Image (cartoon, rainbow, N blue to C red):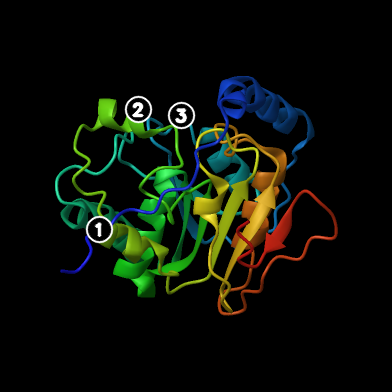
Amino acid sequence: MPQAQTLTSFSAPSLSLLATEPLRALFDFVSAKVGSRAVPIGDGHPVIVYPGLGGGALSTQHLRRFLADSGFEAHDWGGGLNTGPEGHIDDWLAGLEQRVRALHAQTGRTVSLVGWSLGGVYARELSRRCPECVRQVVTLGTPFASLGGGTHAGTVYKLLNRDTSQLTPQLEARLRQTPPVPTTSVYSKSDGIVSWRGCIEKNTARSESVEVHASHLGMGTHGEVLRIVADRLAQPEGGWKPIRRPSAPARSTRSRAR
């Protein structure tokens, strides 16, 4: 008899990291307000930003403003509060796909997708649904390689959504597959919400993992994260190359999950 497939589970972050998340996120935000100045390096192509679980337009406002000031056409995802997929995930994603296709048709340019935490799951999946419309994907603290645990967000997800039937081994296997477009996964070993091990992308010619020292809740306002996102989005279309940073804490990780 074949064994039943199960979801992958890493150890969740320590309770000390979880307890300090709000304070560290506040520090990330204040530090960014003081020391992060946008540099106009973008080429004006459209970017859709997807919030994390329980987030919405307000939670990604700082990130979108920074990207706009950096020379990109930044857009909110348009879905209001992110409470997770409703109904069958593929049917639900079809609605998000329409927005990507519409923006592509409206601007005549491919669209970059930036997703924070759960929002990164949407970005990765959408790049598979309409790769001809997507320029690249950047995820922030997205545990795409571990839906079975390694997170403290499960209780919040159940409160907001109640339907966890779509979180299957089959979906996890699909999420683990590297997207068909250039992809960057930004992760932090000091993440107090999700296991950083579940955020590690495979090593391919067009994908990378980049480590930062940031809280999970502060990813969208952390100064170094903002600069990394802008740097990745500024890569020329068709000429994407892995990030090269001379010093820590930001560094490219080539599938070294330890």
Location of residue 76 in the rendering, given as x and y in whole percent from the top left corner: 41, 43
The residue carrying mark 1 is 98
Separation of marks 1 and 2 at Cα, in angstroms: 28 Å
Percent of width and height locating residue 209: 61, 60
Residue 173, quarter of the rendered image: bottom left
Identified at 32% across, 32% down, the residue is 157
Cα separation between marks 2 and 3: 19 Å
Relative to 19, residue 110 above or below: below
Q: Is residue 7 visible?
A: yes
Give the label, 2 or 3, closer to the camera: 2
- Kindly identify the residue that appears in the image at 38 percent across and 35 percent down: 53
Amino acid under disc 1: Gln
CB under 8 Å between discs 1 and 2: no
Residue identified by numbered label 3: 58
Q: Which mark is residue 184?
A: none
Residue 10 placement, left or right of 222:
left
Q: Amino acid at mark 2?
A: Val
